[in-house]
Image (cartoon, rainbow, N blue to C red):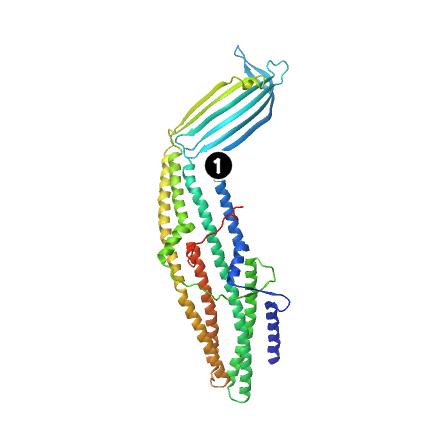
């Protein structure tokens, strides 16, 4: 039994040396702040958040560009038409006449949408050349110019998407900014989870090796006492069982640490095989957060606060669309310009004629079997549904913030209890172990219980520490407010916009 244990101990020590970097690789130490910073810079979640924000940024830029003046150039160089065309003669008979035309046309237009009315104004100029390629044509080449043309195209009762998009699109962009900040805080929460999962595995290894060493020593002492007849065989067997379990615990702790290390390195996108040693956080920030203040910050700063308003506007827009589409509609198109034509391009710009155009179009469905009215009723019901859902979601949102505030406010006491429990359990185990070794405690089960309580208390302290940091960053994410510095969480978006 001694030989097998010694061999196993050497094997475990080799694994520990390998994992700690003393067996050929350097070990990199990380604090919690280091891990959070790396996660925000290079983790997959952080990269995805940046790309999603950039997508929203360019979508907003495209929306704004739709309502800026646009300059357009259109050209046909050339448009060739060689065919036969039916022509009506003076005697009212039709004959087919050969055509051989080459048409060249270029136009330049400046367009501007009128967002408030949903119309569009334009300013344009164009030049057209027509070549008749048939032999003996009277006018082989002609030029037609529209020197300048100004006009407007204005629907009167049609659905105008700009009426609501000018409100919704900026809200969507602001929401995207808030979502990005929330996502970075969520990355911090995930980093905290990975940090403490690996730290707990690291502590677990330390506990496993310590227990193995202690039980090794206790088993040797117990063997000597058994040979002297001072303890019963069942006590020796219990210590031997404890030693075997300690050996298994070391192996399980090593495997668990290896798995956690792989996940940790993968999340932070560290090099494969990177050995890590985590430094437990010492400093914690304890302050009482008023629940109502946190709820107000969440309403003002979070993406949920702006999302509620945006969804209400979206439902109102659908009702507005239903009332406008499929109903009476009218459209006005008017233009005024100068035009001329000639066989010489220069003369086509001299002594121009006025060109005027006015079109008033009307559209009204006479029988739609109640379709338009049905669409309006659907939109009204959807508006009521959205309003009810948002009202409940606001209540749930406030409750969630309140619960998280209460959880954070109690963390100071929870940490104090966990730290005190760890100290007491460690002291109790040390006393019990020393008393057992000098023979004042004969019940090995009492020693087992002290050891189990000590291990649980130590792990409980680090779990309480993990809960504290999770609660801290969860509160930051919900409110987008830094209570430590007493200011909103700010992010510079200039670098992300490039």
Relative to 35, 487 lies left or right:
left
Indicate whether 261 appears above or below 425.
above
* Residue at screen point 39% across, 47% down: 308
* Residue at screen point 55% across, 61% down: 264
Mark 1: give few (<14), some (14-19) or many (20+) Cα within 10 Å. Answer: few
Residue 246 at what x, y percent from top left?
A: 54, 75
Residue 30 seen in render: yes
Residue 245 seen in render: no
Relative depth, front residue between 196 and 32: 32
Indicate whether 259 appears above or below 127.
below
For the image, the number of numbered tags is: 1
Indicate whether 347 appears above or below 477.
above
Quadrant where the image shows the N terminus: bottom right
Residue 466 at what x, y percent from top left?
A: 47, 64
Kindly state the secondary structure of the residue where label 1 is placed: helix
Residue lying farthest bottom?
Answer: 228
* Residue at screen point 50% across, 40% down: 62
Within the image, what quadrant is residue 276 found in? bottom right
Residue 335 at what x, y percent from top left?
A: 46, 24
* Residue at screen point 47% across, 39% down: 64
Within the image, what quadrant is residue 89 found in? top right
Residue 345 at what x, y percent from top left?
A: 58, 19
Residue placed under numbered mark 1 in the picture: 66
């Amino acid at each position: 039994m001694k030989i097998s244990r010694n061999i196993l101990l050497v094997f475990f020590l080799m694994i520990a040396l390998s994992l700690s970097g003393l067996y050929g690789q350097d070990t990199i130490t990380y604090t919690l702040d280091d891990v959070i910073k790396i996660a925000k810079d290079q983790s997959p979640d952080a990269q995805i958040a940046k790309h999603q924000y950039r997508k929203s940024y360019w979508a907003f830029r495209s929306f704004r560009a739709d309502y800026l003046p646009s300059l357009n150039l259109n050209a046909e160089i050339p448009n060739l038409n060689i065919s036969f065309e039916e022509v009506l003669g003076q005697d009212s008979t039709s004959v087919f006449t050969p055509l051989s035309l080459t048409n060249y046309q270029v136009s330049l237009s400046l367009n501007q949408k009128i967002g408030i009315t949903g119309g569009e104004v334009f300013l344009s100029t164009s030049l057209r050349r027509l070549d008749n390629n048939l032999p003996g044509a009277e006018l082989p080449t002609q030029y037609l110019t529209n020197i300048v043309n100004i006009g407007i195209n204005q629907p009167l009762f049609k659905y105008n998407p700009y009426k609501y998009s000018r409100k919704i699109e900026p809200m969507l962009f602001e929401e995207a900014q808030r979502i990005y900040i929330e996502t970075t805080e969520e990355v911090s929460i995930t980093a905290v989870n990975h940090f403490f999962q690996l730290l707990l595995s690291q502590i677990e290894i330390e506990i496993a090796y310590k227990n193995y060493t202690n039980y090794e020593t206790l088993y040797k002492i117990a063997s000597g006492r058994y040979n002297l007849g001072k303890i019963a065989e069942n006590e020796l067997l219990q210590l031997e069982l404890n030693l075997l379990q300690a050996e298994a615990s070391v192996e399980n702790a090593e495997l668990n640490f290896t798995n956690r290390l792989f996940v940790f390195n993968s999340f932070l996108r560290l090099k494969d095989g990177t050995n890590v040693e985590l430094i437990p956080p010492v400093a914690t920030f304890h302050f009482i957060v008023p629940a109502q203040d946190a709820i107000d910050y969440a309403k003002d700063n979070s993406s949920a606060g702006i999302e509620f308003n945006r969804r209400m506007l979206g439902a109102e827009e659908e009702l507005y669309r239903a009332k406008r589409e499929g109903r009476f509609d009218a459209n006005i198109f008017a233009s005024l310009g100068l035009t001329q034509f000639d066989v010489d391009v220069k003369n086509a710009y001299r002594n121009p004629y006025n060109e005027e155009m006015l079109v008033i179009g009307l559209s009204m469905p006479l029988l739609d079997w109640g379709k338009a009215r049905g669409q309006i009723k659907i939109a009204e019901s959807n508006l009521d549904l959205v309003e009810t859902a948002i009202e409940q979601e606001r209540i749930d949102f406030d409750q969630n913030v309140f619960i998280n505030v209460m959880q954070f406010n109690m963390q100071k006491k929870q940490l104090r209890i966990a730290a005190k429990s760890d100290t007491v359990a460690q002291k109790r185990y040390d006393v019990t172990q020393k008393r057992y070794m000098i023979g004042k405690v004969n019940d090995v089960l009492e020693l087992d219980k002290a050891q189990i309580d000590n291990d649980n208390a130590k792990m409980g302290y680090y779990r309480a520490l993990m809960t504290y940091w999770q609660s801290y960053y969860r509160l930051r994410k919900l409110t987008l407010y830094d209570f430590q510095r007493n200011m909103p969480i700010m992010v510079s978006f200039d670098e992300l916009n490039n």
